[in-house]
Amino acid sequence: MHQRKGKKILIYFFLLLLVGSINNIALKNLKFKDIKDINVIGLGNEDNSILLKKIKNLNLENIFFINKNEITDQISSNNLVEKYEIFKRYPSSLDIDIKKTKFLARITSKGKIFLVGSNGKLSKNNFLNNQLPFIFGKPDIDQFIKFKKNIDQSEISYDEIKNLYFFSSKRWDLELKNNVMIKLSRDYTEESLKLALEFLHNNEFRHIKIIDARVKNQIILND
């Protein structure tokens, strides 16, 4: 009884392979329309056009047999891209919807000034946005992104910050637009930031120019 069941299963398996092979051959022999329209949106006219040209150079044939990795490699290599979605519009169109990265700061690398994006990538400073905070020191970009999250979770507005200073000891100082300097702890960054802000927002200490919160649970004030 078990042998008969085993034979039936084998027969069904080979029939499935045979039918599948026939369908694949027939599918490959079908002629589909080549991709005629590719639309890229989200980066601005000039950058959309540059990316569109690179994707068209891939010589995509039809929408059913696209090598998606080729497209995603081109999109991901663009430092302005934060997120993206690719939509197939049958029978012969592609829509690529991109969310552009948000520029967070300026930093010097190899003698040139770059913009730091929220995607953790550096972009050329073609926008001359001098309102963004400047990062002094040489942090890894992911260290800055992590520190930026600490700031966002605090009561300080990121727009209040003029400069950020990163030290080899892996701690940060903040210079605000009102020229107040906040020295933060390396090991207790969130706690020291919170403690410093208690003094920053206290009118009794509005003349203070340096708030030193490097020691845990302590604040040193300097005129």
Image (spheres, rainbow, N blue to C red):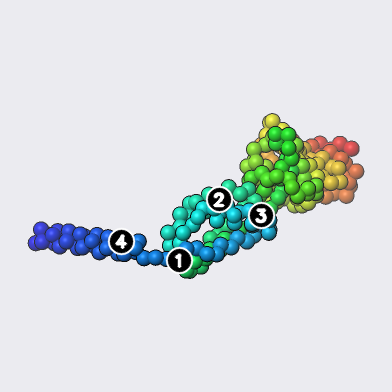
Cα–Cα gap, marks 2 and 1: 23 Å
Dots 3, 4 in contact, CB < 8 A: no
> CA gap, disc 4 to disc 2?
31 Å
Classify 10 Å Cα crowding around label 2: few (below 14), some (14-19), many (20 and above): some
Q: Secondary structure at mark 2?
A: helix
At x 55% / y 50%, what residue is drawn? 74
| Residue tagged 1 | 33
- Residue 25's disc number: 4
Q: Nearer the viewer, residue 118 or 14?
A: 14
Rate crowding at label 3 as few (under 14), some (14 to 19) or many (20 or more) other CA atoms within 10 Å.
some
Q: CA distance from mark 3 to mark 4?
A: 41 Å
Q: Position of residue 126 (x, y in %)?
A: 74, 47
- The image position of residue 209, as x and y in percent, is 87, 40
Q: Which residue is mark 3?
A: 47
In which quadrant is the N terminus drawn?
bottom left
Compute the Cα span from label 4 to label 1: 18 Å
Would you identify the image quadrant in which residue 217 lies? top right
